[in-house]
Amino acid sequence: MDISDFLQNDAVITIRASSKKQLLQDLAKQAKILTGLNDDKIFDVLLQREKLGSTGLGKGVAIPHGKLSGLSSLQGIFAKLDKPIDFDSVDNSPVDLVFLLLAPEQAGADHLTALARISRYLRNQDNCEKLRNTDDQDGLYVLLTQNEAQAA
């Protein structure tokens, strides 16, 4: 599975948020545009997942995710924050790169495979530095999806 299987160019954004809650709300609003699902429902799913433990992986990266009824396929949103925010990450580092993943309720292995793919990509510090040094949406999308076999 490649990132381009669940991330479209128009789902790559730069965003300003002052808190984790605001970021998740803003991402839920963006997800509503992509999925047609209620943004409050999306936000609630993300919030419930965060209550289980932060999806802030460390080194400035977070991968909030959840499963939603009514969703027909995996959907991703990549957000680069203009200013890092506290995300209760495992290393207590502020977050500036966020990859939201939403999956259908019955996604099973596909959900886990997509999460693993995103995590592998974002654990690579060279990839993260390239993302941090790129300011335009198209450039970010290319970085996230180019040479996917090599990035894995």
Image: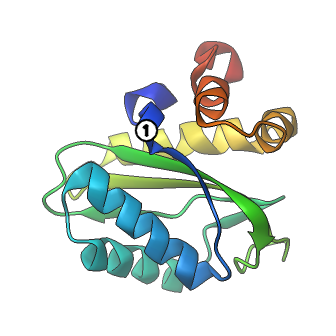
- Disc 1 secondary structure class: helix
Total count of labels: 1
Q: Is residue 130 left or right of residue 152?
A: right
The residue labelled by disc 1 is 10
Point 77% across, 36% down: residue? 134
Q: Position of residue 99 (x, y in %)?
A: 56, 52
Point 74% across, 73% down: residue? 89
Point 60% across, 36% down: residue? 137
Q: Amino acid at mark 1?
A: Asp
Q: Position of residue 67 (x, y in %)?
A: 30, 62
* Residue in front for this viewpoint, 112 or 151: 151
**Which quadrant: the C terminus?**
top right
**Which quadrant: the N terminus?**
top left
Residue 1 in sight from this viewpoint: no
Point 32% across, 44% down: residue? 74
Q: Is residue 71 left or right of residue 126?
A: left
Q: In the displayed structure, would residue 67 be above or below residue 91?
A: above
Q: Position of residue 55 (x, y in %)?
A: 60, 68
Asked which quadrant contains residue 149, the reply is: top right
Residue 90 in sight from this viewpoint: yes
Q: Circle 1: is it few (<14), some (14-19), or many (20+) Cα within 10 Å?
A: few
